[in-house]
Amino acid sequence: MSARKIIIDTDPGQDDAVAILLALASPEDLGLLGITCVAGNVPLSLTSKNARIVCEAAARPDVPVYAGSAAPLARPLITAEHVHGQTGLDGPDLWEPAMPLADGHGVDFIIETLRRHEPGTVTLCTLGPLTNVAAAFNTAPDIIDRVQEIVMMGGAYFEVGNITPAAEFNIYVDPEAAEIVFRSGAPITVMPLDVTHKVLATEPRVEAIRALNTRVGHFTAEMLDFFERFDVEKYGSEGGPLHDPCVIAWLLQPELFSGRHVNVEIETKSDLTLGMTVADWWGVTDRDANAMFIGDADANGFFTLLTERLARL
Ligand code: RIB
Ligand code: CA
């Protein structure tokens, strides 16, 4: 079977970086058409630099990396240096990437790519705020029906928020963009905090990656050594939750996950609950289901997959 064509839209971010590495380690399964960067964890200048660092760490400077939106659709940018560090990729020694940014805007790349490929054959993997995808849908509504699936990391229901008491970061940064995407009608699979908080990079799991004793193994372990601080301190968890790699793992081994097809609406008005993903998990409304909302994962199976694939780089 031919590799599934994907675009990764991202705001690296250590967990984004691991997701990108997992995709690059799986070329027989995933054909990465390009990476579009968005402002989120850190400003666009850094997310678009970090994405190229990750590609070079995987010896893949051929992957086209585009700079996309520098700010949310209708709000000032909120960043998360308190989680990811000032560089957005704190942990390993970093470098100035030699590979240039691809020419053109990330939003235009999303539009042109979806128009160029057969309808239903390109999957959008979103790992950050949904600004780029929403802007592409606003600019070119014709591409919505051409999307095979949007697999996103974002939102929370039972796990509630990580940036406010009610909202998860990716949705909170650009709730208007999230509302556009969730109401678009495109097939959506959501990896919310409900599931990502169950795939924790505990010490044994990080040491298994470090023990690969490869450039990528050490790079990944050093990112995770830094990334876990915030969640261990806040939640008392045993390690950092690998949020974004869940998106790629879903494409590689969906059987690792379980969830429900439910209605998800986005709070865009209330200051108190701005960015909340209101998931009708119990079916108490007559609102149409618009997303596969994932609630559980086989964490050991996830880390076995991740470690085996990283060993290939
Ligand atoms: O809330 C977690 C999400 O926000 C992850 O995608 C992380 O990288 C940050 O973007
Ligand atoms: Ca991210």
Image (cartoon, rainbow, N blue to C red):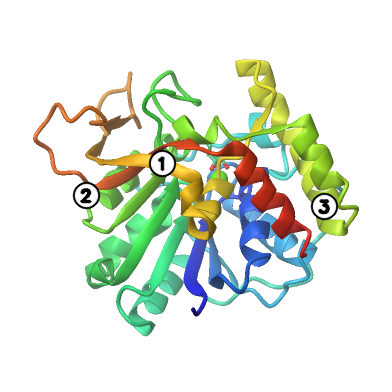
Q: Is residue 253 shown left or right of residue 58?
A: left
Q: Is residue 90 shown left or right of residue 232?
A: right
Residue 156 in the image: above or below residue 91:
above
User: Closer to us: mark 2 or mark 3?
Assistant: 3
Q: Nearer the viewer, residue 238 or 231?
A: 238
Tell me the element at label 3: helix
Which quadrant of the figure has residue 192?
top left
The Cα–Cα distance between marks 1 and 3, rounded to whole angstroms, is 28 Å
- Asked if the residue at tag 2 contacts the one at tag 1, i.e. Cβ–Cβ closer than 8 Å, the answer is no
Q: Crowding at label 2, few (<14), some or many (≥20) Cα neighbours within 10 Å? A: some
Which kind of residue does numbered mark 3 sit on? Gly
- Asked if the residue at tag 3 contacts the one at tag 2, i.e. Cβ–Cβ closer than 8 Å, the answer is no
Task: Identify the mark nearer the N-term, 2 or 3.
Answer: 2
Is residue 100 visible to the viewer in this orientation of the structure? yes
Disc 2 target residue:
183
Q: Quadrant of the C terminus?
A: bottom right
For ligand 1, the image quadrant comes to top right
From the Cβ of disc 2, is ligand 1 less than 8 Å away? no
Which kind of residue does numbered mark 2 sit on? Arg
Tell me the element at label 1: strand
Q: Nearer the viewer, residue 82 or 302?
A: 302
The residue under the point 79% across, 62% down is 57
Considering every residue shown, the one lying at the far right of the view is 213
Disc 1 target residue:
258
The residue under the point 21% across, 56% down is 185
Which kind of residue does numbered mark 1 sit on? Ser
User: Closer to us: mark 1 or mark 3?
Assistant: 1
The residue under the point 78% across, 38% down is 206
User: Closer to us: mark 1 or mark 2?
Assistant: 1
Which quadrant of the figure has residue 289?
top left
Q: Is residue 113 shown left or right of residue 311?
A: left
Task: Identify the mark nearer the N-term, 1 or 2.
Answer: 2
